Amino acid sequence: MTLLTSTERLRAFIASESAGGIVLIVAAAVALAIANSALLPAYEAFLATPVVFSAGSLVAIDKPLLLWINDGLMALFFFLIGLEVKREIVTGQLRSWKQASLPVYAAIGGMVVPALVFVGLNLGSPENLRGWAIPAATDIAFALGLLALLGSRVPVALKALLLAIAIIDDIGAIAIIALFYTENMNLGALALGLMPAAGLLLLNRAGVARSIPYFLLAAFLWICVLKSGVHATLAGVATAMFVPIAVGDERPLERLEHALHPWVAFLILPIFAFANAGVSFAGAGIDALLAPLSLGIAAGLVVGKQLGIFGACWLAVKSGLATLPAGVGLRHVYGLSCLAGIGFTMSLFIGNLAFVDPGQIAAVKFGVLGGSLVSALAGILVLGFAVRRADGTVTI
């Protein structure tokens, strides 16, 4: 088996995420077009199609197609996130404080400030406060997809910094989902989930490198977590923690990550975008965007992310707590902080956990789409200027 260097893995990851981000944009655009056409009833009926899984009298899961996408397919997305997080902490950019300090400060600022902006704009609407975490998320696929439009003019170190911030952001999002969006917990089902978890631990300790045993136990764990009331996607994260980095000359985690990336980037995330981005603008005026819930999300993504990420980086660098990567200046970081306001996938995901009222979910989509669009345009504009010299030539 040919092993890739850390730099080669990083470049391959960025290339995959960048291309996947473009497909994600297309899927979201198609969903928006359908939702604002005569096909809207068919679109809604398709997503409401009941899908039933049953294994005798032991397991019966009856959910509409939309929830199978959000709870089932997205578990693979979270499994991939878990693999990336483990790799980065053990062997990647987050393995030492010197490397991780700047993205850690940036990610914390990029989660805390958007949440504060949202809460500040919704203090008069307590029914909306459950959505405080929605603007705290960053969509790495979308952001890297837009960075790809600038090509080699953007320093690879900047892309690596964005990737590290997004991974830490994902760790925060996973913790938020586990702590704040779990209700009506079934302790019996959760206790039953200890069995497949113990099996995964034994596989890890025994140095099992084959993927199939892990996936079989992961499927059992997913069912237990789903029935427990904890969000089922967290089973994917838990499973990833048991996949070994290395077994002899084999690299099970790297192999799985490499195999799953195309499926997640080019199939699972576009399907999620298609299923969740469809929002009808019929009868919606400027008041829809200025409503506290929509405005809080949009402002959190646009203003909160810029203030949080750039402010944290500026303070960390000026105080000597961290240093900028080679070839990256503060103008690059400001452009990155704008792009980090693209919340899309994770923001929509958390929005679906936070609210059940159709009106609130529609407002979430307005806020996420509006804030992400403004952030994307601002990021491309700022970085477009940041990567050029005063004489018009390009610097990298």
Image (tube, rainbow, N blue to C red):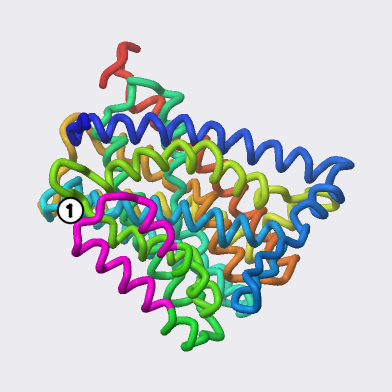
Amino acid type shown at disc 1: Val
Would you say residue 329 is visible in this rendering? yes
Residue at 28% in and 48% down: 253
Quadrant for the C terminus, please: top left
Question: Is there any visible trace of residue 307 in the rendered image?
Answer: no
Residue nearer the viewer, 215 or 136 = 215
Q: Residue at x 57, y 62 (%)?
A: 71
Give the extent of the magenta segment.
Answer: 193-218
Q: Which residue is mark 1?
A: 90
Measured as percent of width and height from the top left, residue 252 is found at 26, 47
Q: What's the magenta bit mostly, secondary-structure-wise?
A: helix
Residue closest to the far right: 38
In the image, what residue occupies the spot 86% across and 51% down? 41
Q: Secondary structure at mark 1?
A: helix
Kindly indicate the quadrant of the structure image that contains residue 291.
bottom right
Question: Residue 119 or 198: which is nearer the viewer?
Answer: 198
Residue 216's x, y, as percent? Answer: 43, 60
Above or below: residue 105 compared with residue 119:
above
User: Could you tell me residue 54's position as x and y percent?
Assistant: 66, 69
Against 275, is 324 above or below?
A: above
- Locate the N terminus by quadrant: top left
